[in-house]
Amino acid sequence: MTPLNRRDLGLLVLRVGTGAVLMAHGTQKLFGWFGGGGLEATAKGMEAMGFHPPKHSALAAGVTEAGGGMLLALGLATPAAGAAVTGNMAGAVSVHAPAGFFAQSGGFEYPAFLGFTAAAVGVMGPGRYSLDHVTGHRFDRPWVLAAAFAASAAAAAAVVGRRAKGQIGADVDDSAVTRGGDTLED
């Protein structure tokens, strides 16, 4: 019998706790569970926050949180799960950044914490008490880690960049409407 490894046990607790939080948030977005609004309400929220197309954005956020959270909790495909959640949280940080850091004022503290935690677990690996360990780390290889974080960073940059570009256009449109003047599209 192998002795209980505190590092692996700590990773299990961190994975399951973080994964459960993410799964709960994802199922709020997808199904309206735990007091969430479901996909339609999430899509309306995504549109209001400047994510387009809103329904695809809502689905992507919900699936990434619920699916990534489940994979993290199970310790399966851990680098890919950690990378996906990290990219998703980068989008959430972009929404909350104008309010500053602290969560009590609407800041980005909470999504940043979830993103950094998912990144740390993805980079560190799931530990011995995981499905990755059971499968011989088939989905937990160095190339998976590099590819997953590169793809997630590129996707997050594209989504956040598109949102920012849309907000700049919306700011111009809103100021033109307020002045009663022409917009750039006229």
Image (cartoon, rainbow, N blue to C red):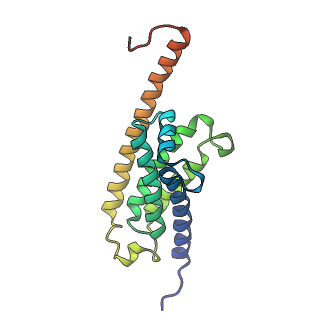
Pick the quarter of the image with the C terminus.
Answer: top left
Q: Quadrant of residue 17?
A: bottom right
Question: In the figure, 23 relative to 5: above or below?
Answer: above
How far across and down, in percent of the image, does residue 138 sit?
Answer: 31, 71
For the image shown, how many numbered marks are present on the structure?
0
The residue at the far bottom in this view is: 1
Splitting the image into 4 quarters, where does residue 143 fall? Answer: bottom left
- In the image, what residue occupies the spot 41% across and 64% down? 78
Q: Residue 36 in the image: state x and y as whole percent.
A: 56, 50
Pinpoint residue 145: horizontal percent, then vertical percent.
Answer: 36, 60
- Could you tell me which residue is drawn at 52 percent across and 8 percent down? 180
- Residue located at (42% from left, 48% from top): 59
Residue shown at 38%/78% (left/top)?
134
Residue that sits furthest to the right in the current view: 104
Name the residue nearer the viewer: 150 or 32. Answer: 32
Res 71 quadrant in image: bottom left
List x then y, in percent, for residue 89.
Answer: 49, 48
Front-most of residues 119 and 170: 170
